[in-house]
Amino acid sequence: MSAGAAVDAEAFKNALASWATGVTVLTAAHEGLVYGITASSFSTLSIDPLLVLVCIQRGNHLERMVPASGAFAVSLLAHGQEAASNHFAVSGRDPATELDGFETFTDRTGSPILSGAIAHLDCELESLLPGGDHVIAVGRVVGAASDAGKVPLLYFRRGYHGLD
Ligand SMILES: Cc1cc2nc3c(=O)[nH]c(=O)nc-3n(C[C@H](O)[C@H](O)[C@H](O)COP(=O)(O)O)c2cc1C
């Protein structure tokens, strides 16, 4: 490739598919309705203060619901929660009074958290930053818990994996 040539979108996606991640379900609640999407763009950001970030595709319901509610929750999926990951990756769903039949609980902010996750982070929205065709939601962590007895769900080369 010559210097300065644009990077092909497929090359970009294939390179990123080589990056192994965990899988999260990002959720928010607003005016009695809840919504969630599968998201792998989760990252820790800061220890003091406690900050995390996640990237939300523009046009998604959460782009509106997260700033409207001022909060979001991140459920880190456990191995065995592939069905939840697949469900919350489907386009064309709408916010509803319950999270599509999945069992949830709340921590501090009222955002729904998926039962059975290996861990969760409950966040107040710190800032919403532009990021191309996504927005970057920075969250101040106000609730966190983990289950040492579970193993994580991993995503690599467009497929799910366990730790082994
Ligand atoms: C493994 C995986 C990771 C994903 N990560 C993100 C992400 O970080 N941010 C995002 O906005 N969408 C991500 N998506 C896509 C969303 O889950 C999907 O676009 C969304 O659920 C569709 O709902 P919508 O029609 O309301 O946008 C991911 C999908 C998969 C399968």
Image (cartoon, rainbow, N blue to C red):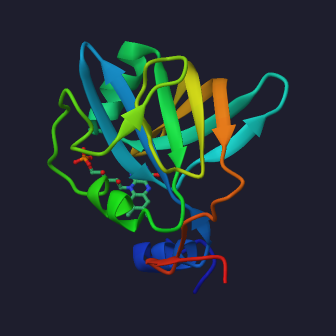
Expressed as whole percent of the image width and height from the top left, the position of residue 144 reads: 66, 32
Rendered image quadrant of residue 143: top right
From the viewer's perspective, is residue 4 above or below residue 75? Answer: below
Camera-nearest residue between 131 and 70 = 70
Expressed as whole percent of the image width and height from the top left, the position of residue 51 reads: 70, 29
Q: Residue furthest right?
A: 48
In the visual, does 48 lie left or right of 97?
right
Camera-nearest residue between 100 and 19 = 100
From the viewer's perspective, is residue 97 above or below residue 91? Answer: above
In the visual, does 120 lie left or right of 87?
right
Q: Quadrant of the C terminus?
A: bottom right
Image point (40%, 24%), residue name: 66
Camera-nearest residue between 32 and 146 = 146
Q: Quadrant of the N terminus?
A: bottom right
Image point (59%, 84%), residue name: 2
Q: Residue furthest front?
A: 149
Expressed as whole percent of the image width and height from the top left, the position of residue 29 reads: 34, 23
